[in-house]
Amino acid sequence: MYLRRSQKPREVKVTNNPILDTQETVEELTLDQTLRPKHLSEFIGQPRLKKSLSIAIDAAKKREEPVDHILLYGPPGLGKTTLAHIIAVEQGGHLHLTTGPAITRSGDLAALLTNLENGDVLFVDEIHRLPRAVEETLYSAMEDGRLDLILGKGPAARTVSLELKPFTLVGATTRYGALSAPIRSRFGIIGKLEYYNNNDLSQVISRSARILNIAVEDNATQLLSLRSRGTPRIANRLLRRARDTAELEFDGNLTVAAVNTTTALLEIDELGLDASDRDLLTHIIKRHKGGPVGIETLASALSEDIGTIEEVYEPYLIQQGLLTRTKQGRVVTDLAYKHLGLSK
């Protein structure tokens, strides 16, 4: 199996703390080839989704056909791209990577689809950002294995139908609700990725440490998992930064002290919150009496992009029970007051 990538790079959100940014960096694109599991049996976490995919893949192999089209949704950094790699490996095809914003015209999509071989996987990240005209072109490809293109304009326009080789489309999105009903209905398998628990994250960190030849104490592994926001990508990033600290200040021993030193420098607390997370919660408490406050007001006051707040900060804060969304706006919970040491 080898990997083909579209020419346009994926967009990357930049936060105040790049360690906790769940978007993949250019450096990590290469490193993840080493850390990324190759088979479903090696994939840690997401047990329900893993079981569902295992059944679908085994059944497709028995029928000697590609697995049905798959939609994966959930916060970034949880393994959507990794699962696309695994599916391609399991069915013996090639993986073709692209993003929704990179496909601007139907011709771009046609070029991708006509280059697919039997059993290939086309992975479309941020599939909710496909232009509507491109999305409509995708319908017949997903349903009938056929690509319908309109050539020319006006009275001279004609429709050309091209047969496609059997393939699997894997779509990924952090915004399931932003997908149109017609494209959602064309996926045979829809799976949600949840934040990882600490036990699974500890396994991820231990596996990565073995691959990278990092000697790490068990207690240090657990401490790293607690500060990783339930996200393997962040866990691996913290592991590498803690390794740097250990090499320079702790004679190469990745101990609890090395982890504490690293997270203190990065201003990451015991829940995995950084200074920006705490600023957001503190602002709502001190300036808006705990809320509710509208997202536009919040973004303007914090000098942050609305999309960054909604897709990077809020999901984890909500999952941890520190913040809630209401029709009137964002509201800080009692748990957030307690965590920050503030009183109502």
Image: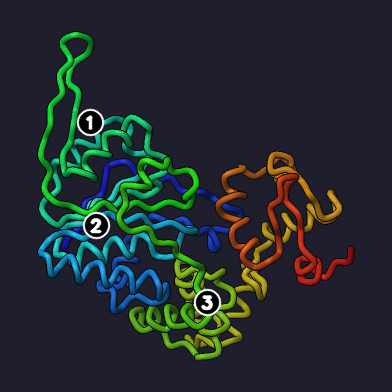
Sequence-wise, the earlier of marks 2 and 1 is 2
Sequence-wise, the earlier of marks 2 and 3 is 2
Comparing labels 2 and 3, the label whose residue is closer to the camera = 2
**Camera-side residue of 64 and 312:** 64
Q: Tell me if label 2 and label 1 are in contact, CB under 8 Å.
A: no
Q: Tell me if label 2 and label 3 are in contact, CB under 8 Å.
A: no
Quote the CA–CA distance across marks 2 and 3.
29 Å
> Which mark identifies residue 93?
none
| Position above or below: 33 against 291 | below
Name the kind of residue labelled 1 in the image. Gly
| Position above or below: 244 against 85 | below
Q: Which residue is mark 3?
A: 197
Q: Residue 180: where, in percent of width, then height?
A: 42, 40
Q: Residue furthest bottom?
A: 218
Q: Tell me: 277 left or right of 106.
A: right
Q: Tell me: 97 left or right of 342.
A: left
Name the kind of residue labelled 3 in the image. Asn
Q: Residues within 10 Å of mark 3 (few under 14, many from 20)?
A: some
Q: Which residue is mark 2?
A: 68
Q: Quadrant of residue 299?
A: top right
Q: Residue at x 71, y 46 (%)?
A: 327
Q: Residue at x 12, y 43 (%)?
A: 164
Sequence-wise, the earlier of marks 1 and 3 is 1
Q: Residues within 10 Å of mark 2 (few under 14, many from 20)?
A: many
Q: Residue 340: where, in percent of width, then height?
A: 78, 68
Name the kind of residue labelled 2 in the image. Asp
Q: Residue 275: where, in percent of width, then height?
A: 69, 61
Judged from the image, the secondary structure of the residue bearing numbered disc 3 is loop
Q: Which residue is mark 1?
A: 107
